Image (cartoon, rainbow, N blue to C red):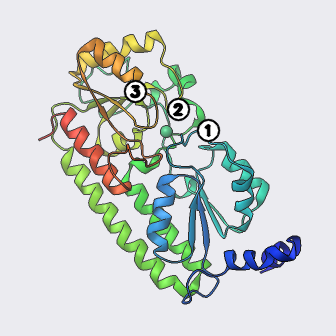
């Protein structure tokens, strides 16, 4: 209310009616308190959309098809944050969003990293010790040598949404937060959150079952975005470049990938849809291997192997099962 009257005072009279129309409650059954939610990037936006159902409004800061890492915001996007009732972001993943939040002071902010629990980055690098089979994934002490490749986002891996169980935790928390913000619709938010969490748990079980029995547990990706998936389903991700998709691999790293691929009987070099597949194609060509898409789910476009979070996750599962010859 205060924001609204402040806004109206700033506008020329002719624009006032327009502003009122634009800011009014979208549907007659809404009470005007319907929350305006802004989500920093796609998986957060999907989660918020599921929980909101038809209530309130939702917008995303990362335009589909742009790289989520190192996002830059327009002045208009930054200004939009001050009107938001709730802003969802992952601290340190997109520094521009962190700065914009600090600058515009939205009513309520959820830093998702405080909800889902992040794991260290760079567990992907297995070069020196990967030859002991079945070592239980104890790679934590291998991060030091390669920390320089991986710490654009600090020491933690941001890609938590590759773990459906963490997504379920996020959705439950969103249900509670939205119920607090908009008590009139609390029952809907709670029910939507419970239904979505159940769907995510079913997805988690599909991954557990689908990846239980495979010829090999290692997989090679260009962008090391699948550490959470590897961690949850006991796979080993071999990332060609680090957690940041912009990093170019060194010739030494490419030589290591050749060696790893041969050692583990890798069939497929995975690449993603939002960045160039040149590195994957070149390595696969050198080794006579296939390339395939494993989508990091940082944005959905026409080139994505699905239309939303669950369908793209399922496409990734199918691709992994095929590459690793899972029963
Ligand atoms: Zn990423």
Q: Residue at 66% of width from left, 42% of height from top?
A: 72
- Report if the beta carbon of the residue with label 2 is closer than 8 angstroms to ligand 1: yes
Labelled pair 2, 1 in contact (Cβ < 8 Å): yes
Q: Residue at 66% of width from left, 70% of height from top?
A: 85
Place of residue 190 in the rendered image (x, y in percent of width and height, measured from the top left): 45, 78
Left of 42 or right of it: where is 210? left
Place of residue 235 in the rendered image (x, y in percent of width and height, measured from the top left): 29, 37
Residue situated in front as seen by the camera: 273 or 318: 273
The dot on residue 280 is: none
For the N terminus, the image quarter is: bottom right
Q: Is residue 101 visible?
A: no
Left of 98 or right of it: where is 251? left
Q: Is residue 288 visible?
A: yes
70 versus 99 height, above or below = above
- Report if the beta carbon of the residue with label 3 is closer than 8 angstroms to ligand 1: no
Mark 1 residue element: loop
Residue bearing the label numbered 1? 70
Query: Alpha-carbon neighbours of circle 2 within 10 Å: few (<14), some, or many (≥20)?
Result: many
Query: Alpha-carbon neighbours of circle 3 within 10 Å: few (<14), some, or many (≥20)?
Result: some
Residue bearing the label numbered 3? 277
- Mark sitting earlier along the chain (2/1): 1
């Amino acid at each position: 209310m205060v924001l609204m009257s402040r806004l109206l005072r700033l506008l020329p009279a002719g624009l006032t009616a327009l502003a009122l129309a634009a800011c009014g409650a979208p549907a007659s059954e809404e009470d005007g308190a319907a929350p305006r939610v802004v989500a920093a990037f796609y998986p957060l936006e999907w989660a918020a959309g599921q929980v909101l159902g038809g209530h309130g409004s939702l917008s995303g800061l990362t335009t589909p098809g742009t790289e989520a890492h190192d996002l830059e915001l327009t002045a208009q996007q930054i200004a939009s944050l001050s009107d938001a009732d709730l802003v969802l972001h992952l601290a340190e993943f997109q520094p521009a969003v962190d700065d914009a939040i600090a600058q515009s002071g939205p009513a309520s902010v959820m830093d998702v990293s405080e909800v889902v629990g992040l794991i260290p980055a760079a567990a992907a690098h297995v070069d020196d010790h990967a030859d002991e089979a079945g070592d239980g994934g104890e790679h934590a002490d291998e991060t030091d040598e390669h920390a320089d490749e991986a710490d654009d986002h600090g020491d933690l891996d941001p890609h938590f949404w590759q773990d459906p169980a963490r997504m379920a935790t996020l959705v439950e928390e969103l249900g509670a937060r939205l119920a607090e913000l908009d008590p009139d619709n609390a029952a809907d938010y709670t029910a939507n959150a419970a239904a979505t969490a159940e769907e995510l748990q079913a997805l988690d079980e599909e991954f557990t079952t689908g990846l239980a029995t495979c010829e090999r547990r290692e997989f090679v990706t260009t962008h090391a975005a699948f550490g959470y998936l590897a961690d949850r389903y006991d796979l080993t991700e071999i990332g060609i470049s680090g957690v940041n998709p912009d990093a170019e691999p060194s010739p030494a790293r490419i030589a290591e990938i050749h060696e790893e691929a041969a050692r583990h009987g890798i069939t497929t070099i995975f690449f993603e849809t939002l960045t160039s597949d040149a590195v994957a194609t070149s390595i696969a060509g050198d080794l006579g291997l296939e390339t395939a898409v494993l989508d990091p789910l940082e944005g959905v476009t026409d080139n994505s192997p699905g239309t939303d979070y669950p369908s793209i996750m399922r496409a990734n599962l199918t691709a992994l099962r095929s590459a690793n010859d899972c029963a």
